[in-house]
Amino acid sequence: MRLKNNAFRESHMEKYYVTTAIDYANAPPHIGHAYEKIAADIIARYQRLTGKKVFFLTGTDEHGSKVEKAALAAGFESPLAFVDETSSKFKEAWRRLLISNDDFIRTTEERHKKVVQEVFRRMRAKGDVYKGKYAGLYCDGCEDYLRETDLVDGKCPNHQRPPQHSEEENYFFRLTKYKEPLRAWLQEAECHVKPDGRRREVINQLDDPELGDFSITRSRKSLTWGIPVPDDPDHVIYVWVDALTNYITGVGFQSDEEAWNTFWPADLHLIGKDITKFHAIYWPAMLMSADLPLPKLVFGHGFITVEGQKMSKSLGNVLDPVYLAETYGPDAIRYFLFAANTFDQDGDFSRADMVATVNKHLAMGVGNLLNRVVKLLDTHFEGTVPAVSIEQGVLDALEKDTAEFRTFMDEFEFAKAIRSIFEIVDKGNKLLSEREPWKLLKEGKLEEGGQVLVTAMTMLKRIAILLSPITPRLCAGIWDQLGFDSNIESVIFRSSEFTDPILAGQKIRNKGRVFEKLDELTENPAPVPTA
Ligand SMILES: [Zn+2]
């Protein structure tokens, strides 16, 4: 196992394990998938900054009839060949968006099949799995059960005929046995489901007498593309037991003892709000049954619309993250999504708004501050940091803004955390416009002018570090221009690199604009569909 930081060897360090939902591999990624992966990446990078050893897992959910059908429709020789291609598109998109995941799990991998079957065996040995009758609406054309909500005028939308009532023998999981311990877990003082509205919703769902034991398999007749039930290959393990288990496979359950002991339980399962029930009821119940510790926190985030509209194939507004990263750069996408939206609520992505926002904040706000400072240092000090002192008041204010940033980041309030960083940006720009170091330097007041520049550099250093989880490429550029030779990703809060002042004699590197202004859009361009 290779981690993005070198912290793994330092066993005394705190750990942090963050997961995303695994995406269903029946279609390529869109901006909605990207939203969650970027959020998890921001959290992972921030936790590395706090000095924890971090493990960050994402991946793809690759079994099920829908994948099998999509593979067939696209003319692939096998479902596996199809998911090989789809999962590689997800990987490519995350690479372009600078997602720093430590592993990428695919549920078709051997390591995962073993774990799913082991979990099934454990639950069965506990007496929590039994055979029962499953009844539902079965479409012969789809070779699958449909939900009431899938039907259009009582008919299968794909085959324009009504589905048949059908029954089959399934294995069921004894969820009802775990309702009491689940309720106790959900009501613990240390909140395990956030935001709190979601937690209350889940408690209500748990109290609903309709929520009974649930089916965890399908007969081979209605599901072939899946993991067989151990010792009973006529039955195939159905979606939730297969998909949710990825979180323990990915962190070495039964394969890498050191990783498993270090990182499980997960500190955070980051998921879309629509699957909170499965993560806050089904999954902890399965873990209780398998005698495994429960995750510390499940967080259900809001959804992203595109230009005010829900994404849909028919509207053609399903934006391709690879296209977006190529056209606007990863920092612009990452920054806008989290500066402009409140993470626990629904949000929006508009290209015209994104361009206007990043131009104002990143090109003008941060970029101009850096640009003016390095130019003046170049002209008046031959690019070398002069030996001057910095006012204590400025340093105190930096600590205050940093503390505020950390408080918001710890609560996943990204937009507010970003605003705390821009307190520093604004103070830096104000310092320059009020003290006018260019005038001081022209008048030969080198000490005074130099002091303003080094103060602004100190602020820029802090801005670069705090903003680096959100816009890693931009911040690496700032770090470089400020003259640091180290990798900004190796900085942690308690290191001297974070706390030390900028040293006299350090050579800056004036490389021009660190963030090029994007062309303003008067209206949003036509949607570009996913590849
Ligand atoms: Zn059908």
Image: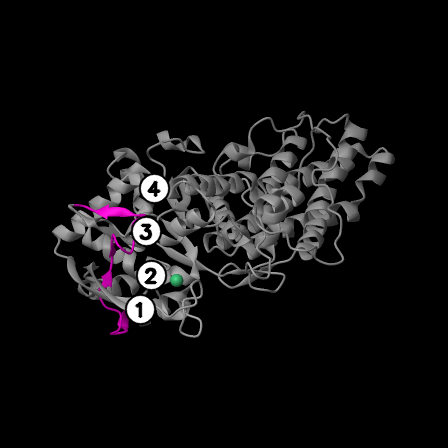
Ranked by sequence position, the earlier of labels 4 and 1 is 4
Mark 2 Cα shell of 10 Å, populated few (<14), some (14-19), many (≥20): some
Question: Which label sits on residue 97?
Answer: none
Which residue bears the numbered disc 2? 140
Q: What residue sits right under mark 4 in the picture?
A: 108
Determine the residue positioned at 55% across, 48% down.
402
For ligand 1, tell me if the residue under mark 4 lies within 8 Å: no
Q: Are marks 2 and 3 in contact (CB under 8 Å)?
A: no
Q: Mark 2 to mark 1: distance in Å?
A: 8 Å
Ligand 1 placement by image quarter: bottom left
Q: Tag on residue 164?
A: 1
Q: Is residue 190 visible?
A: no
Q: Residue at x 36, y 40 (%)?
A: 14
Left or right, residue 349 beside residue 297: right
Residue, disc 3: 244
Question: Is residue 277 shown in magenta?
Answer: no
Q: Secondary structure at mark 4?
A: loop
Task: Judge: label 2 CB < 8 Å from ligand 1.
Answer: yes
The earlier-in-sequence mark between 4 and 2 is 4
Task: Of the two numbered discs 2 and 1 on the same chain, state the one appearing first in sequence.
Answer: 2
Q: Say which amino acid is labelled 3.
A: Leu
Q: Amino acid at mark 1?
A: Gln
The residue positioned 66% from the left and 45% from the top of the image is: 328
Judge depth for marks 4 and 1 and give the one in front: 1
* Start-end of magenta stretch: 205-230
Are discs 2 and 1 less than 8 Å apart at CB? yes
Disc 3 vs disc 1: which is toward the camera? 1
Q: Say if disc 3 is inside 8 Å of ligand 1.
A: no
